[in-house]
Image: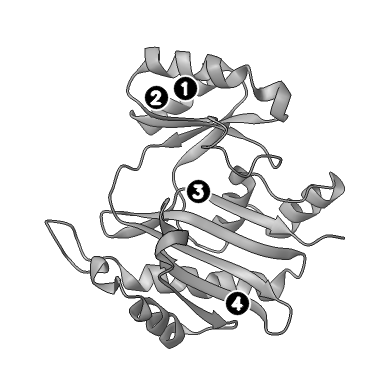
């Protein structure tokens, strides 16, 4: 289990403005927020080994605290179905590792339709504030979100979840299982706790949090640090 204080201290020593995606999810996982199966590959042989262990299809990403919008920069390779596709994608991304001072992240491909978003923002007046809403590329356009000031308890998290207009997508629909609301609620509670326990964290953005079966899993995450 990763120690969140060690992760943050290491980032601060390197004068980072944010944690990398991998470190962001390591910190979230230390608070029992479910995250996708993934690992850092230092070279091609390690990438092949990780992909084989996870099982195809997989995703490759260039992972660096300097990169906040990987998709727009074409630093994400999705749905790699075999070793041949993996090798080609690894070579393309590896050419960018020097430019962006990053590593290659090998990640499980979670190909489901229900995308959520959770987060925490440190409000100047109210302090750590937890957010829940729809995720994915249309999250900002749809603006279907709810907020609570931390700390929050189970009943607060449940209320947040039920407040969004698209709440019914969490039910059992079109052959999909109902979302495990308890797991989702605990993740929201955990975000509030992270904000309260780590004043050096300014913002947490988990988008998307994809529903895999009935379990919401953090597929992408970014933790922004306060300016020192």
Residues under numbered marks 3 and 4 in contact, where contact means CB atoms less than 8 Å apart: no
Do residues under tags 1 and 2 come within 8 Å of each other at their CB atoms?
yes
Q: How many angstroms separate mark 1 from mark 3 (CA)? A: 22 Å
Q: Dot 4: what SS?
A: strand
Across and down, in percent, residue 29 comes to 54, 56
- Work out whether mark 3 precedes mark 4 in sequence or the reverse, and give the earlier one: 4
Residue 220 numbered mark, or none: 3
What residue did someone put label 2 on? Answer: 52
Left or right relative to 142: residue 69:
right
Label 2 to label 3: alpha-carbon separation: 21 Å
Closest to the observer, 109 or 186 = 109
Q: Give the residue number, with chain letter if any, for mark 4.
A: 129
Q: What distance separates the C-alpha of mark 1 from that of mark 2?
A: 5 Å
Marks 1, 4: nearer the viewer:
4
Q: Residue shown at 30%/67% (left/top)?
A: 180
Is residue 1 in view from this perspective? no
Q: Is residue 126 left or right of residue 82?
A: right
Residue extending farthest front: 141
Q: Compared with residue 189, is residue 81 higher up or lower down, i.e. above or below?
A: above
Placement of the C terminus among the 4 image quadrants? bottom right
Residue named by callout 1: 49
Q: Toward which corner of the image does residue 211 lie, by quadrant? A: bottom left
């Amino acid at each position: 289990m990763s120690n969140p204080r060690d992760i943050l201290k290491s980032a601060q020593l390197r004068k980072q403005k944010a944690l990398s995606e991998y470190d962001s999810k390591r910190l979230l996982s230390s608070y029992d927020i479910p995250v996708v199966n993934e690992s850092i590959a230092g070279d091609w042989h390690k990438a092949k080994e990780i992909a084989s262990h996870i099982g195809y299809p997989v995703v490759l990403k260039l992972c660096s605290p300097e990169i906040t919008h990987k998709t727009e920069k074409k630093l994400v390779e999705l749905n790699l179905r075999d070793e041949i596709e993996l090798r080609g994608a690894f070579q393309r991304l590896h050419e960018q590792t020097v430019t962006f001072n990053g590593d290659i992240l090998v990640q499980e491909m979670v190909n489901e339709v229900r995308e959520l978003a959770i987060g925490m923002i440190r409000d100047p007046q109210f302090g750590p504030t937890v957010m829940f809403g729809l995720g994915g590329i249309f999250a900002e356009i749809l603006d279907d979100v709810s907020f609570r000031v931390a700390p929050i308890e189970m009943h607060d998290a449940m209320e947040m979840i039920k407040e969004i207009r698209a709440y019914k997508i969490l039910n059992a629909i079109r052959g999909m299982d109902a979302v495990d609301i308890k797991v989702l609620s605990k993740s929201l509670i955990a975000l509030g706790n992270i904000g309260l326990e780590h004043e050096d964290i300014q913002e947490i953005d988990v988008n998307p949090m994809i529903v895999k079966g009935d379990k919401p899993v953090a597929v992408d995450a970014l933790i922004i640090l306060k300016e020192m």
